[in-house]
Image (cartoon, rainbow, N blue to C red):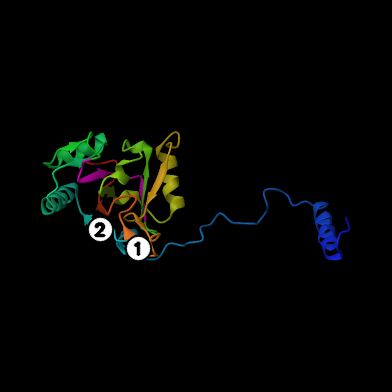
Amino acid sequence: MKISPSKETILKKIRQALTHPVPVPFPGSEGTDSVFQPSEQELELSFAENFTTLQGRFSFCESMEEMVQQLQLLIANRGWKHLYSNETELKNSLTEHGIKQPLDATSLRNCDASITGCEALIARTGSILLSSGQQSGRTTSVYAPVHICIAYTSQLVYDIKDALQLVKEKYDQLPSFLTLATGPSRTADIEKTLVVGVHGPKEVFCFLVEQPANNNS
């Protein structure tokens, strides 16, 4: 089979290149610095702006007591009767601070809303990072019609890289799964029309408490 002159030229260049291989890893091919640089505004504000842009509902609370008051008001206004949570520490903290509604850990299928904590809040994208290390499992933030996340200012980071570093520092071994929740579930597969709540919760609430994550008292 005769090779065309243009193809022969390409093959010749490849052979010449292979005689001088590039060291691996490629030096200087990419840096370790993030492409995205933090803005000058506070992380709380950046997260709130990006989260609400994605149709999330955000509330900043100065204490756990204030958060519980706002949560109880939300529950009363919506008429919710069945709440689901499977995180022991979170449930105990809510109960200690006055939450009156039972947090059933056996009725995710029929609940009005699920309540979880998180591993981190990512300001740049308005995302919530969740993991299997929270006891919530893979379904808690997905199957319930409404997802309520309770987070702390100490869990705020700028980018995904920073969030993963928090997880690495928290666990001896990485959890079996990590997931990013970025606003309510939505798709535009049906005639390019945006539909919310098709493959997950129709609403996502985030209560951000100004308090360290390891100090819930």
In this view of the protein, which residue sits in the foreground, 39 or 110? 110
Query: Is residue 217 inside the magenta stretch?
Result: no
Q: Residues within 10 Å of mark 1 (few under 14, many from 20)?
A: few
Which label's residue is closer to the chain start, 2 or 1?
2
Q: How many marks?
A: 2
Residue 17, by quadrant, is bottom right
Quarter of the image that includes the C terminus:
top left
SS class, disc 2: strand
Q: Which residues are magenta?
A: 110-122
Residue on which the image places disc 2: 57
Q: Give above or below for 173 relative to 25.
A: above
Q: Give above or below for 33 relative to 176.
A: below
Residue 16 placement (x, y as % from top left)? 84, 56
SS class, disc 1: loop
Quarter of the image that includes the N terminus:
bottom right
At 28% from the left edge and 49% from the top edge, which residue is drawn?
Answer: 152
At 67% from the left edge and 53% from the top edge, which residue is drawn?
Answer: 27
In front: label 2 or label 1: 1
Q: Is residue 80 left or right of residue 43?
A: left
At 28% from the left edge and 58% from the top edge, which residue is drawn?
Answer: 56
Query: Is residue 118 inside the magenta stretch?
Result: yes
At 14% from the left edge and 50% from the top edge, which residue is drawn?
Answer: 75
Residue 197, by quadrant, is bottom left
Residue on which the image places disc 1: 194
Label 2 is placed on what type of residue? Arg
Q: Give above or below for 28 relative to 151.
A: below
Residue 83 placement (x, y as % from top left)? 19, 42
Label 1 is placed on what type of residue? Leu
Residue 95 placement (x, y as % from top left)? 15, 38
